[in-house]
Amino acid sequence: MCTFVNIKHKKHITIKQFQRLNKIESNEDIETRILQASILSDTPTDTLKAMELPKLAKFVNDTIDSYDFDFKPKNHKETIMVNGTKYYIVSDMHKIIAGQLMDLSTYAKNEEEVIDNLHYIVAILLRENKKEYSGETLDDRALLMQDYCSYNDIYDVAVFFCKILTKLQPLLEEMMRKSLLATSNDGDGSFI
């Protein structure tokens, strides 16, 4: 059953909520607002559609109004908390290692997939307590980011890297290819 909560501070949407909201056409009709409230409150649309109109209208408006949709660039944060763990945001291209760059280029290969892969992109850009990057735990970190990371906290960094990567993709691939070819030409036929 849906409960109403008096919220003093606006909530931030998670990456998963943002991804789901992004798939809805931006209309101001009641169907769209019900879908938005369903996603934000994690309440099935059938449950909402079974409500009496005055109760439904209040629930939909209160739910949508309780979230912060202000995604304008803000002062960049160095760290954020995700599910009780502190993560360091890597926002300097010079601090990104080759493995991160390769993983970023995989998940930001084209602009159409960036939002669907946003949780992976964020998991690649965040380092837990400044630990070294590990691609081996990427899937687990990506799911954690999707469920618990505030989209508001990572918006600036994600947009910046996505724009850069989609434009640099051909250059990065050429650099990697030349580097691998140069390494393989040491005479023994191996890449090492």
Image: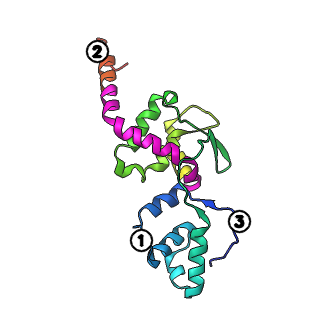
- The residue at which mark 2 appears reads as 185
Residue 189, position in %: x, y? Answer: 28, 17
State whether residue 41 is above or below residue 166. Answer: below
State whether residue 51 is above or below residue 29. Answer: below
- The residue at which mark 1 appears reads as 27
Magenta residues span 147-176
Corner quadrant of residue 89: top right
Residue 185, position in %: x, y? Answer: 28, 15
Q: Residue furthest top?
A: 187
Q: Amino acid at mark 1?
A: Asn
Q: Amino acid at mark 3?
A: Lys
User: For numbered disc 1, what is the local secondary structure?
Assistant: loop
**Camera-side residue of 52 and 142:** 52
Residue 175, position in %: x, y? Answer: 33, 26
Q: Earlier in the sequence, mark 2 or mark 3?
A: 3
- The residue at which mark 3 appears reads as 8
**56 left or right, relative to 121:** right
Mark 2 is surrounded, within 10 Å at the Cα level, by few (under 14), some (14 to 19) or many (20 or more) other residues, namely few
Residue 192, position in %: x, y? Answer: 38, 18
Q: Earlier in the sequence, mark 2 or mark 1?
A: 1
Report the mark closest to the observer, 2 or 1.
1
